[in-house]
């Protein structure tokens, strides 16, 4: 299936899925391999990783969060998709840290608001479907 670029189709078909587990953002001083990392970002100050909270012992970690995958096959060139999704969450006061993968977009939302975030995204998709 080709990646989708149409904003309406992306929103209608986003199919948000709450993934199991609790995660945290952590920083490490070098690019060493961190077991269990699901996201790695090299920054000037060090390497940021998103890891299961259970794997964060001894790391400088914060932001306990849940991982939501938007199952629609989104194009990396799509315009406005993450802006619309994060706006829907922002409108109800939920922070979101998005990460784009080759096939899908992913959101890391506050752990204690994970169910609410999923419901907001599901309502947004339903509203777009008509």
Image: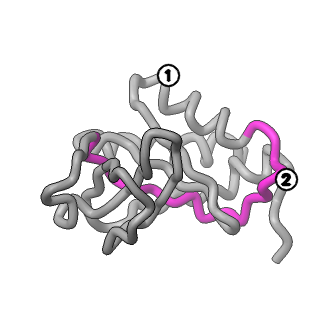
**Looking at this view, is 39 or 10 the one in front?**
39
Q: Which residue is mark 1?
A: 91
Q: Position of residue 7 (x, y in %)?
A: 80, 44
Q: Which residues are magenta?
A: 63-80
Label at residue 61? none
- Residue visible at 56% across and 51% down in the picture: 99
Mark found first going from the N terminus, 2 or 1 = 2
Q: Is residue 119 visible?
A: yes
**Residue at 67% over, 63% down:** 72
Residue 108 percent location from the top left of the image? 42, 48
CA–CA distance in space, label 2 to label 1: 24 Å
Residue placed under numbered mark 2 in the picture: 5
Q: Nearer the viewer, residue 122 or 50?
A: 50
Give SS at disc 2: loop
Of all residues, the one furthest to the bottom in this rendering is 1
- Closer to the camera, 124 or 40? 40
In terms of secondary structure, where does tag 1 sit? loop
In percent of width and height, residue 79 lies at: 81, 41
Viewer-side residue, 3 vs 97 = 97
């Amino acid at each position: 299936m080709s990646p989708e670029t149409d904003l309406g189709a992306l929103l209608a078909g986003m199919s948000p899925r709450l993934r199991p587990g609790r995660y945290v953002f952590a920083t490490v001083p070098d690019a060493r391999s961190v077991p269990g990392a699901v996201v790695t970002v090299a920054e000037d100050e060090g390497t940021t990783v998103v890891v299961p909270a259970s794997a964060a012992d001894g790391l400088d970690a914060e932001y306990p969060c849940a991982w939501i995958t938007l199952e629609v096959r989104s194009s990396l060139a799509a315009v406005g998709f993450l802006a619309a999704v994060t706006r829907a969450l922002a409108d109800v006061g939920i922070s979101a840290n998005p990460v784009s993968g080759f096939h899908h977009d992913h959101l890391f939302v506050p752990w204690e608001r994970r169910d609410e975030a999923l419901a907001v995204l599901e309502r947004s998709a339903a509203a777009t479907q008509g």
